[in-house]
Image (spheres, rainbow, N blue to C red):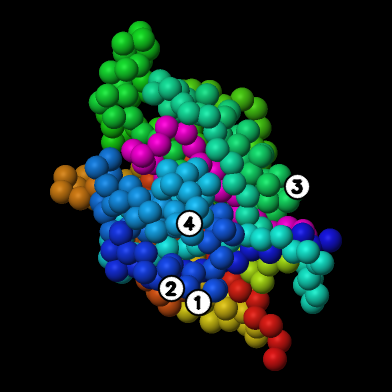
Amino acid sequence: MRTTAVDVFRIATRGPGDVSGLLSLIASGRIDPKSILAILGKTEGNGGVNDFTREYAVSALCAALAPHLDLPPDGVEQRIAFVMSGGTEGVLSPHLTVFTRHKVEHGAKGVSGKRLSIGMAHTRDFLPEELGRSAQIQETAKAVATAMADAGIADPRDVHFVQIKCPLLTSDRIEAAAARGNKTATTSAYTSMAHSRGASALGVAVALGEIDGEVRDEDVLRRYDLFSAVASTSAGIELMHNVVIVLGNSASSASAFEIGHAVMRDAVDVSAVIEALRSVGLDVGAEPAPGREFVNIFAKAEASPSGTVRGFRHTMLEDTDISSTRHARAAVGGLIAGLAGTGAVYVSGGAEHQGPAGGGPVAVIARLMPER
């Protein structure tokens, strides 16, 4: 029995505070604001600790949606999962991807196979000293299981992308932990982003059975043989808990969309992107098979920690002027944009334990068009 339907809307933005495209779709009736479950965005900030375009975008969206939901802006943020990824280097284009979900009263005709489903969950708030450690791993794993149930997905093999927004450390948070006699995983705010992203990704791997055995504190950012093939984690200053969004295919969904994924083994892995496109009936340039339409690609990118890509040295880790995550986003973003035929794709930097070292997951959503 098909019980829910999910829709996906990709909306271009002119700046991190631009909500005009979303409001236009609401005004036209294409989006019911009460059905919005999650919004993923790419903003044109630096993607670092001080990237306030992420918070600005969320604030603008909450203020815009508040009157439509009869909630104060902070209530909107509690109701909808917002994940803003800073950094649109190179040809990457700022945009929003809005996911809606509504109940289907009498099932759906003409829908066969498993279709796109989405589920959401939150962890509890973390103490600063818990970030990048087993507490964050374990709590994330619990939240992934909850989000899978919310999406109506029972088989981990049907999960194709898990997007997580996670916290980072600031000087105030580090000092608060020290005042309690506790040490944080690092005293660097920037490095804490990697610790939080990595622990969150390992939580996904634990939840989906991608890792056998216990994961220890010392495995984070050290055991790169431990990773999730579907995790995408993004750290931000605006929260102290993890927001977990599970995307997969479910027999309970009446959606007109499908999702598939592959894993890039490095930043120039063209074949993995093509494999992901073809998993939902698309080809290079996002050329569709009959009845298919490209919606978006979601990918992770990072500079190979070995300092080489396929035997040749790269300098991303040695550039004092530009962060390696910005190099990686630009490189992978350009590769994916060329294959997808658009720069409006979601490429996030910092892929610690998200795919093999130097690589990362890549997921594609396609719309199944009705037969004419």
- SS majority, magenta: strand
**Which residue type carries mark 3?**
Ala
Q: Which residue is mark 4?
A: 39
**Which residue type carries mark 4?**
Ile
Label 4 vs 2, first from the N-terminus = 2
Neighbourhood count class around disc 1 (C-alpha, 10 Å): few under 14, some 14–19, many 20 upward = few
**Which residue type carries mark 1?**
Ser
Residue at (36%, 34%) from the top-left corner? 168
Q: Is residue 106 above or below residue 120?
A: below
Q: Give how far apart the Cα atoms at labels 4 and 3 are.
A: 24 Å
Toward the viewer: 312 or 196?
196
Q: Is residue 6 above or below residue 28?
A: above
Q: Secondary structure at mark 2?
A: helix
Q: Which residue is mark 3?
A: 154
Direction from residue 225 to residue 337 in the image, left or right:
left
The residue at the far right in this view is 1
In the image, which disc is placed on residue 89? none
Q: Give how far apart the Cα atoms at labels 2 and 1 are.
A: 6 Å
236 falls in the magenta region: yes
Q: Which residue is mark 2?
A: 24
Q: Which residue is mark 1?
A: 28
Residue at (28%, 63%) from the top-left corner? 15
Report if residue 339 is visible in the image. Answer: no
- Image quadrant of residue 280? bottom right
Q: Position of residue 362 (x, y in %)?
A: 51, 58
Report if residue 126 is visible in the image. Answer: yes
Direction from residue 350 to residue 355 in the image, left or right:
right
Q: Give how far apart the Cα atoms at labels 4 and 1 are.
A: 19 Å
Q: Which numbered mark, 4 or 2, is in the foreground of this view?
A: 2
Neighbourhood count class around disc 3 (C-alpha, 10 Å): few under 14, some 14–19, many 20 upward = few
Q: Is residue 163 above or below residue 298?
A: above
Q: Position of residue 135 (x, y in %)?
A: 52, 24
